[in-house]
Amino acid sequence: MAERRSTGKAGRGAAEAAEGRGGSAAPASGVPARLAVRKTYKLYVGGAFPRSESGRSYPVTSSSGEHLANASLASRKDARDAVTAARKAFGGWSSRTAYNRGQVLYRVAEVLEGRREQFAAQAAAAQGLSRADADRVVSAAVDRWVYYAGWTDKFAQVLGGANPVAGPFYNHSAPEPTGVVAVFAPQDAPLLGLTSVIAPVVATGNTAVVVASETAPLAAVDLAEVLATSDLPGGVVNLLTGRVGEIGPHLASHADVNALDLAGSGELAVEFERAAATTLTRVLRPRPAPGGGEDAWLDPDPGTSRMTPFLETKTVWHPVGV
Amino acid sequence: MPHTAFAPEATTNRALRAFLHGLPGVDEVGARSRAQDLATRSIKTTAKARAVDLAISMVDLTTLEGADTVGKVRALCAKAANPDPSDRTVPRVGAVCVYPDMVATAVAALGGTGIGVASVATAFPSGRAPMEVKLADTRRAVADGASEIDMVIDRGAFLSGDYLKVFEEIAAVKEACGAAHLKVILETGELVTYDNVRRASHLAIRAGADFVKTSTGKVSPAATPPVTLVMLEAVRDHHADTGRRVGVKPAGGIRTTKDAVRNLVMVNEVAGPDWLTPDLFRIGASSLLNDLLMQRTRLTTGTYPGPDYYTLD
């Protein structure tokens, strides 16, 4: 749900204190007013929801400038912790069978479908979409998870296979996940755009550190709650909210990050690409989508273009008859 | 203090027992909370850089596996002499710690670097062997060129109250060491109480140990902070009594730079800054060195390093 006021620590403390007195200090009507239960928007790292290590937060407003909530302002140490969590989760997630990864991604779609009201209301508040448009965006986001769930056990056939070679060898290529991918989610498409960049990364067996849209990060935190309840192992997707300019350089130059998706990095893309080159990090620097916004991501069949950049091709030469 | 009354020449079981049981008991809750309190110190920037370099110079780079090979020991020695091949300003480690049969290999591989070879001896890790075997083990390691011997105490004898046996074993091994330094492993994970850790530390120190070491690394829990704290108190008290400085070596379970720095803080606060040298404080570890190197890279370059850029062992 969209929020109207700050949910910082002090605010919560005051609310709890007020609750303690609630019984004796009833309003004039005789029925105590119910206290609002507001959500604290936190990070999602290693399967848990910690506050930023720095203790900071920043205000998030609706498209019309109304205060919605405070989101955690992640620091470089949160980014480091997220990379550690993603690295730890990589072994387990990448060795799951493709079929099992497909099941988990489909489960994400199921859980997201069950919470579509919340996401539609969120999209309407954050982006000023009409209710019909918000519903369309949520449906497309659910379908996107189903789409990549289907790809999990098919991309290997499409991108790999037996190669014809002029010699007594059986030659075989197979795509393998590249490792930890740092994803800068699109700035102007906080739900469908976010889904469209996370799903292909994890579908192929990578783990992700995602920097959510700076101005509209609340949908990302809500999506993290969906991921946390969808059998996706902790650490496979780690979500940070905060400033791309602050966290980004540390993720781009991090030697334990294997690939970057610069979808939402804006003008910093050049700087990040340069930093990534020092540690031979793979980089996907997509062209800005025409038109922008969630509409730019509505194509129901985005293909393999977001999966192939985060795959390594392993080729095996096996002597025939041995 | 009661232990000043102890006269080493009067070594009977009764005298040792009276002395060790006359030591003040360890306040367990107090030791835990003091260790926890010291672990909250924040060491940053230039202080951290110095702490990391100091910790690297204190590492006893260890490989004590049944699967150790000559090749693995040589690789370890190369790493000890030059921990980060891309950065020549990294200090050398304190020593290399191997099984006795690998001493000759390690000495040859480290020839000319000045890094000492420490060898575990006396039927490490259990210590369950006849005395002649333990002494032969020690003499052979020293003859092969080991400059430090890490012996294990007979925990069975200690726990059953036969302090004289433990005392005499340590004294005999010390004699067999000759010029080599003697580190005495108490295996605190098997000593059950902090009182026992304090008693075993004082017993080992008085029997001639140059270092007291927490654990073999084969028993869990290994070097927990309160145990290291109690041992640091023992060497501090011994120095106050006699003026002789004995070293401390926590081993096992110290894997991160944060753990290592916390140990250094504890050394400084409990034993004093005089102990902040590889001559009096060592850390027995294998995976710690990579984490120290990664932290060092982070401090010098400003970017986060990854484990792919460092050797596995």
Image (tube, rainbow, N blue to C red):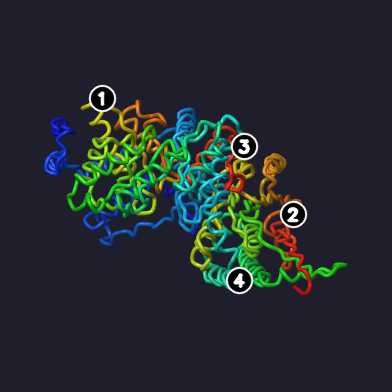
Circle 3 or circle 2, nearest the eye: 3
Taking the image as shown, residue B15 lies to the left or right of residue B125, namely left
Residue B85, numbered circle: 3
The correct choice, above or below, for A43 with respect to B42 in the image is below
SS type, badge 1: loop
Disc nearer the start of the sequence (2/4) = 4
Instruction: Compute the Cα span from label 4 to label 3.
Output: 39 Å
Can residue A117 be seen here? The reply is: yes
Taking the image as shown, residue B189 lies to the left or right of residue A207, namely left
Q: Residues within 10 Å of mark 2 (few under 14, many from 20)?
A: few
Instruction: Compute the Cα span from label 1 to label 2.
Output: 75 Å
Q: Can you identify the residue that label 4 sits on?
A: A97
**Residue B251 spot, x, y in % from top left:** 39, 44
Q: Are marks 3 and 2 in contact (CB under 8 Å)?
A: no
Residue A19, numbered circle: none
Pick the residue in front: B250 or B154: B154
Disc nearer the start of the sequence (3/1) = 3
Instruction: Compute the Cα span from label 1 to label 4.
Output: 65 Å
